[in-house]
Amino acid sequence: MPDRRPGMPYEVKRDYVGYGANPPDPQWPGGARLAVNFVINYEEGSEPSIQNGEAHTETGHTESHGGAPIPKGRDLAAEGMFEYGSRVGFWRLHRLFQERGLPVTIFACALALEQNPEAAAAIRAAGYDICCHGWRWVKHYELSEAEEREHIARAVTSLERTLGRKPDGWYCRYSPSVNTRRLVNEHGGFLYDSDYYGEELPFWVTVEGKGHLVVPYSLTNNDGKYNMQTGNAEQWFGFVRDAFDMLYEEGARTPKMMSVGLHMRLIGHPARAAGLKRLLDHMMQRRDVWIAKRVDIARHWMATHPYPGKGLNE
């Protein structure tokens, strides 16, 4: 049991055991075997750029990913690839989900949504839930505690202004700092964070004497695969479909959660969006699957498995 003496700050603890061989039954609505959450990472307009004070133009998750950035001055090619995501990719993904009446979670970089009021209005109208993806696309582990605290507050204020409400959750663009979870908890108003990749079910931790819910995310079932070994939509569809089918089969005994991460400038291109279309239609053929907002998964867990007074690894 971690030391809970007054004044002892929260410390991120490593846990190699988790739920172990007997994970809890999440009791998903309708007796679903699997809860699936789709995430659109809305980042375009918040990335490192010359205009925003960085020394380089970001190329991550673009057609030039892995290429050497221009060492001095603007990389206009990379800028256009980011702009494609907000100008075109967002609307293609939005249509795919709206046509099927499926919910989406937006991992929202606050500055990015300030750049596109039309997209912000569409997100509001669709009722997508919002998980704050930071104020800027920066490395939180390089910020001082005071700087990180300011970034969290600034992000929440910005999203409340552009979307009309505060975000439900938090997720860093890069790895979080050792202070992030404590500062998110300190700021208040968040139901959960998703800064964790080592689990397939939500779980509780204790932060400064309070229960804090972690809804884990995945970089595996993610369109980032297009920057690695995956070459086309059929390969991506096959990979994520296999994950879904395996979890669905296991769900007859031990229901789990599945996150699918999307980036507008990546899977928003037609040749890749075709794989997403196949995946959505494949999942919708199963009746006992709960395709849900991330906030609904968090609220369900809070109601069904309330904070036990100590975290999973405590």
Image (spheres, rainbow, N blue to C red):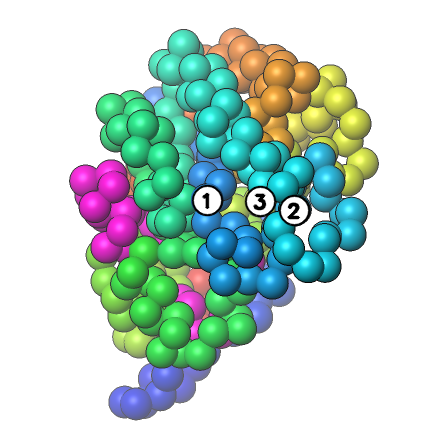
Question: What residue is disc 3 on?
Answer: 218
Q: Residue at x 65, y 21 (%)?
A: 272
Q: Amino acid at mark 2?
A: Asp
Nearest the eye: 170 or 91? 91
How far across and how far down the image is residue 2, in percent?
43, 81
Q: Residue at x 44, y 79 (%)?
A: 144
Question: What residue is disc 1 on?
Answer: 45
How far across and how far down the image is residue 216, in percent?
49, 49
How far across and how far down the image is residue 27, in percent?
37, 35
Nearest the eye: 310 or 218? 218
Q: Residue at x 58, y 54 (%)?
A: 198
Instruction: Mark 2 and mark 1 in contact? Answer it, CB < 8 Å.
Output: no
Residue 23 vertical placement versus 189 (above, below): above
The answer to whether residue 162 is magenta is yes
Q: Quadrant of residue 122?
A: top left
Instruction: Mark 3 and mark 2 in contact? Answer it, CB < 8 Å.
Output: no
Question: What residue is disc 2 on?
Answer: 75
Q: Amino acid at mark 3?
A: Ser
Q: Amino acid at mark 1?
A: Gly
